[in-house]
Every structure is written in structure tokens, then in C-alpha cells.
Image: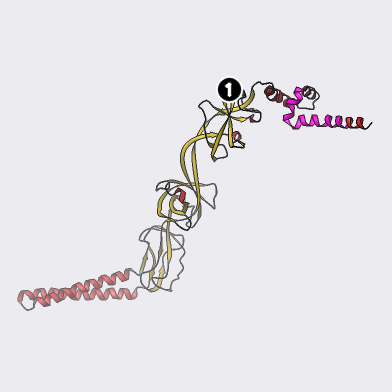
Amino acid sequence: MRTVTQIVVVALIAVVTIPMSARLVPGTRPWLDRIGLLQPLTVAGIVPEQAAVDAGTSWTTNSAGNSVAVIAGDVKSETLRDVITAIGSGRGVQAVDLSFEVTGRLDAILVAPGDRVAVGDVIAELDAGAARLAVDRARLVLEDRQKTVDRLGQLVQSGATTALQRQEADLALQTAKLELQSAERDLSDHKLLAPVAGYVGLVEPQVGDLVSSATKITRIEDRSSLIVDFRVPERVAALVAVGHPVEATAISTPGEVIEGRIVAVDNRVDEGSRTLRVQATIGNADDRLRAGMAFQINLVFTGADYPSVDPLAIQWGAEGAFVWVVRAGRAERVPIIILQRTAEAVLIEAAFEPADLVVTEGVQALRPGVEVTVTSPRS
């Protein structure tokens, strides 16, 4: 009685597990087909019909010694790309901090923050009353010295003066001219002029403040284009050169790529960070970018061409990565070295032959030397 019970239990387990394995474990379908159960289970609806067809067209043919149906394609070629990403800060192509060269009281501010100025525009003025008086005084002295020289020139003809007196008068005239130039220069220093074209920054001092050469009045920045300062690892130091294209993306506006070019490369690698300082220029014709912004910089270095395969083709074994290829109608296992991965392809080193087809689907049933039939991908 106990033996009968065990037989019944085993039969019930078989009744339950065989249909489930036929549905869930594709590897059991060839075995079910060999013992004659696959077709009855398909007719009864326990095994999906498509699964039975798949088993009959791939697994059963393989077990019978016929060809294995796979999906394969030609070996493509792509260029190896080394992309270096760095973060840098931008500044105007020209930027100048402005301050007066003389000490004085601020008399007028002729611009407002954000104004665009041209070269030579007056930014601010100091109280120049004393400087004007000094110019007027220097002019009077010059006129007097000139009259003295003219008078002595007339007396020389009559012999009423000496050459020494004429020489001293000429020296005094030249000295007066220099003093006038110095006074005029001091007067001009009371006006602060824009040395470059650009946009005016914040103006900290106010009218009436006493300022000196150490007092920053404002900053003018030409942001028609920006210079981005960044660093690259020393391993690409020999590849970076002036004129190399870059792609810049402002951190504040991701997705907007700005084309640029390298304009300067430092002459030494920083020993602490093992990086090389590089500067690139990017356009800003629409004036959307500002100095001080952070940018992500991408530099692309291209290398040699290498075989490119679908990521699905990459397999792994005890000896490393490999792919299956169809060579002369049969499956061959080709070891590979992975060089670079992208979302669409994998660049590899491998000993391919010209007519090789790389298998992307159906690799589970392949063995070295098995006959292969290449089919079209399912729609």
C-alpha cells in the first residue's frame, strides 16, 4: 500500500512539473519532443504553439544534427573615440578692473551697471579744480619763458646778451613745457576712461567718496565670447593642441551644446593634481552667457578604426570575452578584447576574417563547428 502511494505522488508531481517546465524552461522542450510529449502538450494548449514551433525549428533540428538557426550580421567598423570631460569656469574674452591713477574726491559717475561702453568712453570723474589750476599756472609759466627766449633772441643780434643767458632761457622754456605736460596728464587722470569695449559691472563707490589708485570703481567685461579655463589629465597632454575643437555645456542649461576651440595650453603639468591647464573660447553672440558660469567641457580624441559589434553578441567564458561568428556555414568561437563600450555598439580587437558574420541571437544552442543557418531578425 505504501509503495502504491509513493507511485501516485510521483505521478502527480510529473503531471504538474512536466507541463510547467515545458512552459517556463525552454531547455526541456527538445527532451519532451524526443519522448513524444511536446506535440500532445501543444495540442492540449499546455505548451504555447509558438514555443513548440521555436523548439521544432531550432532545438529539435540541433538535436537531430541539422543546422542551428541564428541571427547574424556583418562586422562593422568604427573609430575609437576617447572623450575627456572636465568642468571649467568662464570669463570674458577681455576684462579690466578700473581705478583712478590719482587720489581725489569722486565728482561724477557717468555709467550704470549693465551699460555697454566703447573704448574711450568716460566712466567716472574726480573733482579736478586743483588740477585745472595747475594746468593754467603751467601755461602762464610757459608763456613767460617763451617771451624771455624771444627777447633774448633779439638782443643777441645787438650783442646785448651772452650765449650763456640764451642757453639758460632755452632750458627754462623746455622745463616749462614739461611742467605743462605733467599738469595736463594729471588733469586727464581725473577722468576714468574705458580701455576696452564691454559691459559695466557694479559700481561700488558713490559720488563724494575719496578714492585712490587702490579703490576699484567698477569692472568692464567683454563677453562677446568667453574664455573657459579647465584642466585635463596628463595622459592626454600630448594630444591637446591650440585649435582643437571642444563642446561646452553650461551647467545651468544642460543639453545646449556650444562649439568652441582651444586657444591656449599651459607649458607644464601641475605636479600636485597631475593635470594640464587649458583655455578654450566659446561664442556668446546672443549674450546669454555670463562670466563666472560653470561649464562642462568635452574633448573628443579619435584613434584608429576597430571592429564594432552589437552588445548582444558579447559572450563570456572561462578564458574571457568572445563572440560567435558564422564562418563557412559553421559556428566558430572568436576571442575578443573589449576596447570601448557605447549604448549602441562595442569596439573590440578580434581576429575576424572578411566573410565572418557575428551572431547576435541564437547563441545558446551554438557549439564550435555546428552547422548554422542565418535567418532574418523577427519583426
Q: Position of residue 186 (x, y in %)?
A: 31, 71
The residue that appears at 43% across and 51% down in the rendered structure is 281
Q: Position of residue 291 (x, y in %)?
A: 47, 57
Is residue 333 visible in this depiction of the protein?
A: yes
Q: Is residue 336 left or right of residue 98?
A: right
Q: Is residue 31 magenta?
A: yes
Q: Position of residue 89 (x, y in %)?
A: 48, 56
Query: Which of the pair 313/121 is nearer the observer?
Result: 313
Q: Is residue 138 positioned above or below 296 on the image? A: below
Q: How many circles with numbers are drawn on the protein? A: 1
Q: Is residue 21 positioned above or below 291 on the image? A: above
Query: Which of the pair 210/52 is nearer the observer?
Result: 52
Q: Which stretch is magenta?
A: 9-37
Q: Is residue 342 magenta?
A: no
Residue extending farthest to the right is 1
Disc 1 designates what residue?
329
Tell me the quarter of the image containing the N terminus: top right
Q: Is residue 294 left or right of residue 331?
A: left
Q: Is residue 7 left or right of residue 269?
A: right
Q: Is residue 181 positioned above or below 321 on the image? A: below
Q: Position of residue 101 (x, y in %)?
A: 36, 69
Majority secondary structure of magenta residues: helix
Query: Which of the pair 51/328 is nearer the observer?
Result: 328
Residue extending farthest to the bottom is 160
Q: Is residue 113 positioned above or below 177 on the image? A: above
Using the rendered view, name the quadrant where residue 14 is placed.
top right
Is residue 229 visible in this depiction of the protein?
A: no
